[in-house]
Amino acid sequence: MEKYYQVKVYDQDNDYITTWADVVSDIEFNNEINSAGGQLQLTLARNAGDYGEGTDVSFGYKVQVYCFDTEEPNGLLVFQGYISAYTPIYKDDKVQVTVLGYGSELNDYIIESGATPYITQTSQNKTYATGDIYGVGQYYAKIQTFTMAANKTISSVDLMFTNTAAATYLVVIAEYNGVTPDVGIDSTVATGRITMPAGTSAVKQNIVFDATVDLDSTKYYYIRTYSYSGVGYVHAVNTNPYAGGKLWEVVFVGTYWTTTGSVAADDLYFSLYEYGGNTTAVYTAQEPVDILKDILGQYNAQGGAVTEPALPYTPLVGSLLKGTTNNIGTWGTAYAQVFRLATTQKINAIQLYTNTSPIVGNYYIEVYQGNPDLDAIDVTAGTFTYIVDASNTLITTTTLNTTTNKYEFLTPPTLTAGIDYYFVIQGNQTGLYSVTSSAILGASTSDLPITTTGVGKQYRAVVNINNSGSGMIYDTTYPALYFNIYYIDPIPADINGGYVDTGTSVSYTYKVNTILEGINVLKDLAPENWYWYVDQGRNELVFREKSDEPDHIFSLQKDLIDAKFEKRTEDIVNTVYFTGGAVSPGVNYYKKYIDANSISLYGVKSIKYSDSNVTTDATADLIGNNIIATKSQPELRVALDILDSNNNQGVGYDIESLQVGDVIAVRNITQQVGLSSWDIGKWDDAYWDFNIYNLSSLRMQIQKIEYKADRAIVYASTIPIDINKRIDQVNRSLQALQTVNNPTAPS
């Protein structure tokens, strides 16, 4: 199909205005690694004296650009931003519109101490359906009343959701009379929304309100939530743990809301967060990803648009809905759950749900092929998880992620489509969830486990004193365990979040730093080869480690219009003089980092690095060693002019699939006999033995992309370039000195 674009315009309330059909300029924009993104310049063919100012051309209006082509016939959102400037051109009867990517906002917001839970009720053992449950246009919502012990500013709320199909939830805080909620007359004081994808299972989500709200301790409030797009389930508990309120049900019928009654013994799962306002934020011995989530959450609470990546994972197979808690007892009962995969597939995670946090060693799980038979299985108490084949031969050990209740397989086995498998779980903790329906996720009946004894059923066996299974029976009371089976690569820190932990612990104190500065600090504190960028289509901040293998391999004859290669030593850094903050009166932290091998080859190449917020070896070493590791060797750069795949010649590449930070390689470059690229992989003394034509085995990281309609210009390097990083670091150091004695909060 012929490639084309649509440019849609929304007002500041995100209401659709129009689609610009009079764009006469090419769609061109760029993005760069470790930066907040770029901008888009559009030219509209319209009367310069009457060009729609205040109608569809207005400051702050959102502009979204969709690309339609062979790979994305339904359209792909490739850029979004807000109108920051417009210039009417009278001689040509045109208007030029500047659209800034939302990443530009990251330098407009200051890091403040994080929001903290103020009211918390996090018990849950049941779900309530919300939305148009019966498909008759009547929307059911749940209300949780609450009171404030003191006047507080609230920025967000945690709720827990489950849904089989995608659902969009409205979440509001409203003030009421303290007796009976009446949605029709009660005053809404805060509003938030969240969309959950299909296959969501007991996921806690933080809903940030459109604006912070001041709540008064002398008044009465409630949280109201329901799905207005699809049926969704909200989690609650029936043990009445929260004394400050209770659960109510309301329903929208035609044109009005009516209150159907209260459930006095039930409370919603919820946590209200108090907004933090201090401009000094101290993080001690924390994972950089956790710090990033915190400062992004603050930014979002203040109205910032760039978010954490939303990467929920859809299970390969699993239960549809969580039911009741089923006590698995103390080394006396084991359970087996039958399942079948629709396609031959690796698996590396099984997720189960409990009403208490699991303890490693208190559960174990095994996966077998065939129908359940525990008589031949040795279920040793307290062992870690194992996956075994039909002959009970050990394949691989696994570990238990106690945060997600997910069993992670270190060497993922491949399970064959259409073959019955079952996993066995045994443990000494109570509270393993089962479901009261045998419905299992699958595209069709043929995808479901069909055994000689039933479809997708859960079985139970009594385990004797020697821990040998016996007496396998089908459990008619709880026909299926609540489970999800996944293949996720890489395993994320949060199965419902978009970040993988760096595996490090850092300490840092922010003083009057912007969100952008904070992100760049975390990049410095992260291990070597970590990077970030703003995905300008999704409007998400990506923070990840560079791939070991190429994400894209280009063919010289098929994909490239032109290629330029360069070897350079200008940016080598092999000596770092690190100046930190005061460690005693009048004495700053001061340390030197060198790479002796690089110095012997290329001479001394030094820089001064200053950050008055750093006063410990642990934090300074992360930054200093990171600089040395990434900058101490010569750099190879390449500029590739890549043809888009939408043409009649059957050549080119899907340029919309390219992202900064991706690793690339080029094949079909002429190889010269006797030369090897092994040396570049080792960064040893023979670095220059590498010949620039041996690019098929050379891995380079994309530093910048210039997107055009019919091609993309890709700039890649063996070393991160950080074009704007040095200027930012100098500014950050200067500001740190200027603000070092600031109080924790402004007056």
Image (cartoon, rainbow, N blue to C red):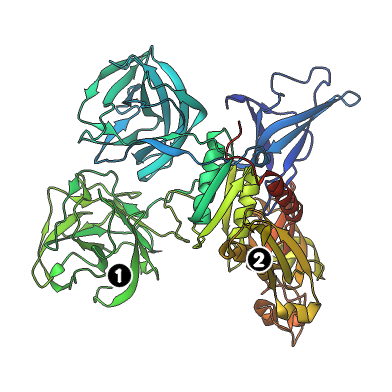
Residue 440 percent across, percent down from the top left: 28, 49
Residue 54 percent across, percent down from the top left: 71, 18
Residue 556 percent across, percent down from the top left: 74, 67
Q: Is residue 54 left or right of residue 744?
A: right
Instruction: Say which mark, if any, is on residue 624.
Output: 2
Q: Quadrant of residue 203?
A: top left
Q: Is residue 577 above or below residue 112?
A: below
- Report whether residue 287 is seen: yes
Mark 2 or 1, closer to the camera? 2
Q: Secondary structure at mark 1?
A: strand
Near-viewer residue (289 or 374): 289
Mark 1 neighbour class, 10 Å CA radius: few under 14, some 14 to 19, many 20 or more:
many
Q: Name the residue type under label 1.
A: Ile
Q: Secondary structure at mark 2?
A: helix
Mark count: 2
Mark 2 neighbour class, 10 Å CA radius: few under 14, some 14 to 19, many 20 or more:
many
Q: Quadrant of residue 300?
A: top right
Residue 200 percent across, percent down from the top left: 37, 44
Q: Quadrant where the N terminus lies? A: top right
Q: Name the residue type under label 2.
A: Gly
Q: Is residue 591 above or below residue 204?
A: below
Name the residue: 70% across, 66% down.
555
Q: Is residue 634 left or right of residue 373?
A: right
- Report whether residue 529 is seen: no
As measured in the structure, the alpha-carbon distance from the residue carrying label 2 to the one carrying label 1 is 42 Å
- Of mark 2 and mark 1, the one earlier in the sequence is 1
Q: Residue furthest right?
A: 91
Instruction: Say which mark, if any, is on residue 387.
Output: 1
Q: Is residue 683 above or below residue 727?
A: below
Q: Is residue 281 left or right of residue 225?
A: right
Q: Quadrant where the C terminus lies? A: top right
Near-viewer residue (644 or 191): 191
